[in-house]
Amino acid sequence: MIELIKELILDAQSGPFFTGTLRRIKIATVQNKASVIMGVRRSGKSTYMNQIVSNLMSGGISAENILYINFFDDRLSNLRTLGLDQIIQAYYLLFPRKKSKEKVYCFFDEIQVIPGWETFIDRLLRTENCTIYLSGSSAKMLSKEIATQMRGRAISWEIFPFSFQEFTDHLKIKNNSPFDGQERILIQNAFEEFSVSGGFPEVIGLEKALRIKIHQEYFDSILFRDLIERYDISHPRALVNLARHLIDNIASMYTLNSLTGFLKSLGYNVPKSSVSEYLSWFEDSYFLFTVRLFDASYRRSNANPKKIYCIDHALIRSVSSGILVNSGHILENMIFVALRRVYPEICYYKTKGNQEVDFIIRNQEGQTHLYQVCETLVNPSTRQREIIALQNAMAELNLSESMIITKNLEDVIPVKTGIINVVPAWKFLLELKK
């Protein structure tokens, strides 16, 4: 086994590494902590690790100081019984002079398939001069479990499917303001393509039928491999039907009672506590996300109806029945995912008059922002409804600005409390991190 591991280490060092489109993600390493790259299946975690390796080598780190192992290689299956010590033994047999003298950069992909990996990583951090990067199936490397099992020796970083900015990078389209002339047209055309294909790197540029097939395979893998097999669920079809029901009602309100009643109507006697667990598992696997009501009281926030969103808007189109999902909900989901990349906590807001604002966030500086998503403001009653909701929310929260995100419209609307900026979605998505 050690000879095989030596071969794999040398093969990896000789490259080439597939780096794909450069991700606009920067992770900071912390001494004596492993960096864990987490995210939904097929979002590009392994490719991102390759990008880190490439950057290290470009920065002068010798290939010999890179230890890269993909544990999904079936030739390493014996490590389940032989133990992970074989990895480090093989490396130092190849490069004995580096022991305790030079920093080794360890990249372990899909390490969760080997039992006991947590204690192995913990020991490496304590005993070796190394920097460690880990990635793997999110359902077996959940942040709350890593925090417990690695006793504070890991820091987690999230990776999502391509943002619109990364999507335009992939298409080699200039995406920095000012957006003028031909570049603006190219960006708007790219946004239409992004609206259809979504952000999973593997499906970009594929014809519709193939894209749908791949999305559906993602859906099945997340549910059956990440959830049903992992948790040994007694009612697997109930979980699948719940997931499909939520996809069909994306960007809509739900309650635990309504979801439990839905499953009961299908003949599943699933208790409310189990439905709550299903929702938690969906979120842990970066598949479906719950948004709560903004309220100072967690009890009130948790007791009120919640909204549901999906990791990728195009995945919704490929998996849903198409009966209830509309383009407005797809746009709202797209904006949610963009916000979720930047802000871990997103809520919706209800005014005292029971008017709803889609998203409210507080940034690290303590500033509050309100976002309303509306595909078009052409209809006068729709326009009035969206403006009044934001105006009242701004007054209640003492804010002078808010935003409506539309498909194409750009405008500034003065209101009693300040201004509402109306921004096209493509522009919002490109300027969000700024």
Image (spheres, rainbow, N blue to C red):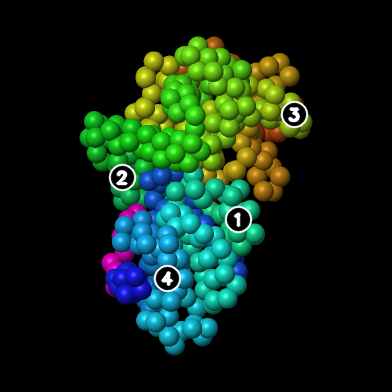
* Residue 430 visible to the viewer: no
Q: Which amino acid does label 2 sit on?
A: Glu
Identify the residue position indicated by label 3 in the image: 299
Identify the residue position indicated by label 2 in the image: 202
Q: How crowded is mark 1: few (under 14 residues within 10 Å), some or many (20 or more)?
A: some
Q: Quadrant of residue 322?
A: top left
Q: How crowded is mark 3: few (under 14 residues within 10 Å), some or many (20 or more)?
A: few
Residue found at x 67% / y 41%: 362
The mark tally for this picture is 4
Residue most extreme to the front: 81
User: Which is more N-terminal, label 2 or label 1?
Assistant: 1
Q: Residues within 10 Å of mark 4 (few under 14, many from 20)?
A: some
Numbered disc 3: secondary structure: helix
Residue 369 point in image, percent of width and height: 64, 36
Residue sitting nearer the eye, 165 or 74: 74
Q: Is residue 297 above or below residue 380?
A: below
Numbered disc 2: secondary structure: helix
Q: Indicate which disc residue 149 carries.
A: 1
Q: What residue type is labelled 1?
A: Gln
Residue found at x 63% / y 53%: 148
User: Which is more N-terminal, label 4 or label 1?
Assistant: 4
Marks 2 and 3 sit apart, C-alpha to C-alpha, by 41 Å
Q: Which amino acid does label 3 sit on?
A: Arg
Q: Indicate which disc residue 356 carries.
A: none
Residues drawn in magenta = 14-23
